[in-house]
Image (spheres, rainbow, N blue to C red):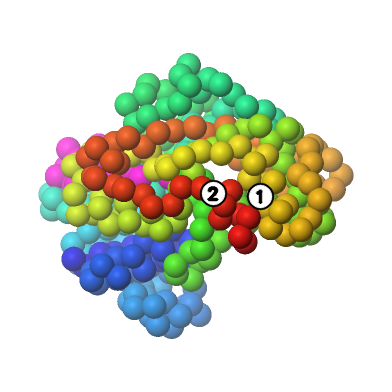
Amino acid sequence: MYVFVTGASGYIGGSVAARLIQAGHTVTGLIRDQAKAEDLARLGCRPVVGTLDDPAVLTEQARRADGVVNAASSDHRGAVEALIAALAGSGKPLIHTSGSSIVGVGADGEASGKTFGEDILDADSAWEPDHPIRKARLAIDRLVLSAAEKDVRSAVLCNSLIYGPGRGLGRDSVLIAALVHQARSGGVVRHVGSGGNIWSNVHIDDMADLYLLALEKTPAGTFYFVENGEESFAAMTGAIARSLGLPGPRPWDPDSPDNVWDPQFARHALGSNSRVRGTRTRDLLGWRPRHRSITDWLTDL
């Protein structure tokens, strides 16, 4: 299969591209930075320099490909519209990347036993986010799913907290990198509030395996939560403290003078709960993740 991957120099897109190449597929990757083109080519991915604001580039590459993975941004509606238009009537797969922050609740680092009226969400749960950014992202997810009506074999992979080393040019998970950067900068490991808030999580290699399965097997118009377990931020930061030999973890107020995180990022990402179940990935695609414990991985950083 010839696959066009956006965000090919990033953490998710780069890891997906590497997995597809490993499986014997031919991959063309969209990157913004010409300087990274040779690095990407050395990994076996044919680089195409451009951005999500280049509909002509997106259209040309999508039409050439046997399938498309959009891993550059979950929030760029124009790019999604261009990819859907390019693939309409083809029956080709379009795999779009979303994130489980869309179901996030709470912002103070405390555990929340209820998420939209249910303990834990699965792909069939009825829910509507209340934050404007989450609403806009969900609207894009639904646009992708509706592409099935245009004979596009579309799917949304809604990733939970991803951990593990990236297999392409992008090496670091956003949330984990933020926690580790703060710890190294401040000399003590912190979490928002008590750190009792919980996120589902998935290892980057297991996630990449799922993208491969989705390209090959997904039914059209299917939404998947991507997870293989869950953990509290207190447990994760505790593992980071052990790994780095630093004191902590300690509670932290996003409004404190020593803030190294953007307060909105701290509250709505590091301080929220995002608990989901990915039963559909197992039932429909036969996904069998191999990695289970984020804390074991963090302890060995």
Q: Which residue does the image show at 85% across and 48% down from the upper left?
A: 258
Which residues fall within the magenta stretch? Answer: 145-159
Q: Are marks 2 and 1 in contact (CB under 8 Å)?
A: yes
Query: Would residue 112 be visible to someone looking at this image?
Result: yes
Q: Which residue does the image show at 38% across and 52% down from the upper left?
A: 290
Name which of mark 2 and mark 1 comes first in the sequence.
1
Q: Which residue does the image show at 35% across and 45% down from the upper left?
A: 157
Residue 248: x percent and y percent?
79, 46
Q: Quadrant of residue 195?
A: top right
Residue 278 among magenta residues:
no
Residue 6: x percent and y percent?
37, 61
Q: Nearer the viewer, residue 159 or 4?
A: 159
Quadrant of the image containing the N terminus: bottom left
Tag 2: residue type? Ile
Left of 14 or right of it: where is 105?
right
Residue 239 is tagged as: 1
Residue 157 among magenta residues:
yes
Q: Nearer the viewer, residue 277 or 123?
A: 277
Q: Quadrant of residue 298?
A: bottom right
Disc 2 to disc 1, C-alpha distance: 9 Å
Tag 1: residue type? Ala
Secondary structure at numbered mark 2: helix
Quadrant of the image containing the C terminus: bottom right
Left of 144 or right of it: where is 270?
right
Q: Nearer the viewer, residue 51 or 115?
A: 115
Q: Which residue does the image show at 52% across and 53% down from the upper left?
A: 163
Crowding at dot 1, Cα within 10 Å, few <14 / some 14-19 / many 20+, comes out as: many
Q: In this view, does 8 lie above or below 253?
A: below
Q: Name the residue under label 2.
A: 294
